[in-house]
Image: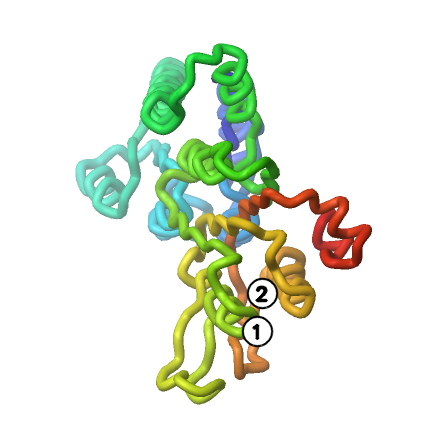
Amino acid sequence: MKSNLGILIVEDDKYARLNLREILQPYGAVDEASDYETALGKLGQTLYDIVLTDIDLGGDSGIGLISTIVRKGSHCIVVSSDDSDEVVEKSYTLGARHFLSKYKLTDQLPVYIQKFIQQKTAKFEKILSDQFITQDEDLIHKLRRLCDINWKNQNLFISGPTGTGKSLLGKLIHEITHPAANLVHLNCSEFSENLLESELFGHEKGSFTGAIMARQGLFEMAQGGTIFLDELGELNLDLQPKLLRALEQREIRRVGSNKPIKVDVRVIAATNRNLEEEVRAGRFREDLFY
């Protein structure tokens, strides 16, 4: 697998950020935040493989970012000139995976990133051998190339005949790009229209017969992770605009409620239908397809 990591540097010192960028650029796409609030905003919009954060952010504490970084499923590395036992212990307690002294970054950080890449590659190979039973070297090569692409912040659509491993491919991409986050699966063909809306978006108490209590839908359950929608082509036309809103505006409304709920979910969808033909036949929305 290629080195195509998504990396965020959280550091208030301009020259320290520049130094980190020079070290990390060979390993992928590097983003930067110079303060706590900017970092929170970027973490809310983008999924990163690795986030490096300083402890002292010019009045704000990078310590407070660690739990957010971990919750988003990113690998957290704390970098600081303060390597006291108290700071190091607190960083690890909150979920940081590694602590590096700023005075040793040039020597130690590349070694650590290479180790991270090796572990990621080994995990990919294990998943590949465990889940895909094939001796087709061309297929294996294509799977490796597919997972070299940084899908971390993109919704995906997989099409193909029944039994070709679409759900396995979706799981593989999730495990490679966002392994620490939730993955929930739903087959759209297994539910009626009304029940499918409730499964996806949840419902409020009393919103329909049998709704004796409020219930979260899968979009809320998958918060910060991935929802795999199998047989997307079975989705009713009346429900398609609600899915489109979830994708475009990143918000949903439970059945029986007008209150919007913000969601941070990546969608992987699959179907055995030809959706281009479904669009031409008026059974699938063109804007949702594209």
Seen at 52% across and 75% down, the residue is 254
Q: CA distance from mark 2 to mark 1?
A: 6 Å
Front residue of 38/7: it is 7
Q: Please tell me whether residue 42 is drawn above or below residue 21 in the rendered image.
A: below
Seen at 50% across and 42% down, the residue is 47
**Which numbered tag is attached to residue 244?**
none
The colouring scheme, among rainbow, by chain, secondary structure or one colour, is rainbow
At label 2, which amino acid type do we have?
A: Glu
Confirm or deny contact between disc 2 and disc 1 (CB under 8 A): yes
- Determine whether the residue tagged by mark 1 lies in a helix, strand or loop: strand
Note whether residue 12 is visible. yes
- Residue under label 2, please give it: 251
- Residue under label 1, please give it: 260
Seen at 67% across and 69% down, the residue is 238
Image x and y of residue 115, in percent: 34, 18
Q: Please tell me whether residue 272 is drawn above or below residue 102 in the rendered image.
A: below
Q: Quadrant of residue 210?
A: bottom left
Q: Quadrant of residue 70?
A: top left
Q: Please tell me whether residue 9 is drawn above or below residue 273 in the rendered image.
A: above
Seen at 59% across and 42% down, the residue is 272
Front residue of 151/167: it is 167
